[in-house]
Amino acid sequence: MTILVTGATGNVGRLVVDELVAAGERVRALTVDPVRAALPPEAEVVVGSLAKPSTLPLALKGVDAVYLAPMARTVEKFTRLAREEGVRRVVALSGSSVGESHEMSSGHEFEAVEQAVRAAELDWTFLRPGAFMMNTLGWAGMVRNGEIRTSCADARITPIDLGDIAAVAARTLVSDGHVGKTYELSGPAAVSQREQVEAIGAALGKEIAFVELTPDEHRREWAAQGIPEEIVDWLVEGFGRVAANPQVPTGEVERITGRPGMTYAEWAVKNADAFR
């Protein structure tokens, strides 16, 4: 079986390539820059991108299954070409924000991808991860200054490591029982922002001060950083929703892969250099 990985240099796609190669699968990697990608020699590399549908017929030739990175703008062209080339199996990266109505949400893009793949009557599986652990890399500057400032300090979320998403993608591509399934993916535990900061401090061997802001204070600080008002409002409102409705781990990573998901503390140790 030949598996095409689109977005093979993306945050998740690159890891999907590694997972599939390690499993001994025949992998074709779609990328615009093979040299920068530094893909494993076992992977067949095809130059192209979902953003350039003219590159897809060659990439899809002889392919049995596809890991589909989310790109709503060209997804209908992809599905048409996939059907023309006889591809049946598609595992698409989506997101837990599907169904959100706010115009700033990425849920609209994810929903468009899901709808197009369903409409094409492909054998689909949708992966809907929540917040990425890597999102907290945005704290790196504050960590270096020794202080994190944010609101809703004790709101509990279930962030997930990119490697766990890739492991699920690889497993659902090559094993039975996943067609027509939508998987809500989470990390193995709910953690607060305060606990995440403590984990980063432990990984670095230093104490990081935590300053909890009120929502209005947070709005003002983000606005002072030049973040548009509508984005600020959306972010603060999102923090408030999580504070009122703590997230609960779904357990899908563990069930599908048969191994524990990465905890935030483990992730912090693995990525400690990014905060130094």
Image (tube, rainbow, N blue to C red):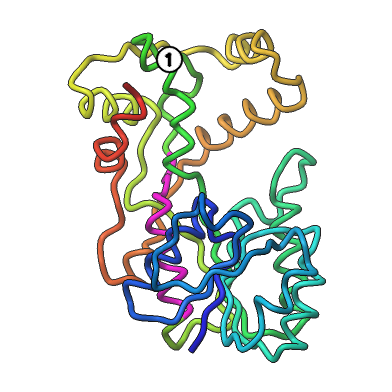
Q: Quadrant of residue 121?
A: bottom right
Drawn side of residue 38 relative to residue 91, left or right: left
The amino acid at mark 1 is: Met
Q: Secondary structure at mark 1?
A: helix
- Residue at 54%, 58% in the rendered image: 34
Check the image and report above or below for 7 versus 169: above
Check the image and report above or below for 28 versus 205: below
Q: Is residue 5 magenta?
A: no
Drawn side of residue 59 relative to residue 154, left or right: right
Check the image and report above or below for 100 versus 42: above
Q: Which residue in the protein does label 1 denote?
A: 142
- Residue at 77%, 47% in the rendered image: 101
Residue interval drawn in magenta: 157-173
- Residue at 56%, 75% in the rendered image: 4
Q: Position of residue 43 (x, y in %)?
A: 45, 72
Q: Quadrant of residue 78?
A: bottom right
- Residue at 38%, 56% in the rendered image: 163
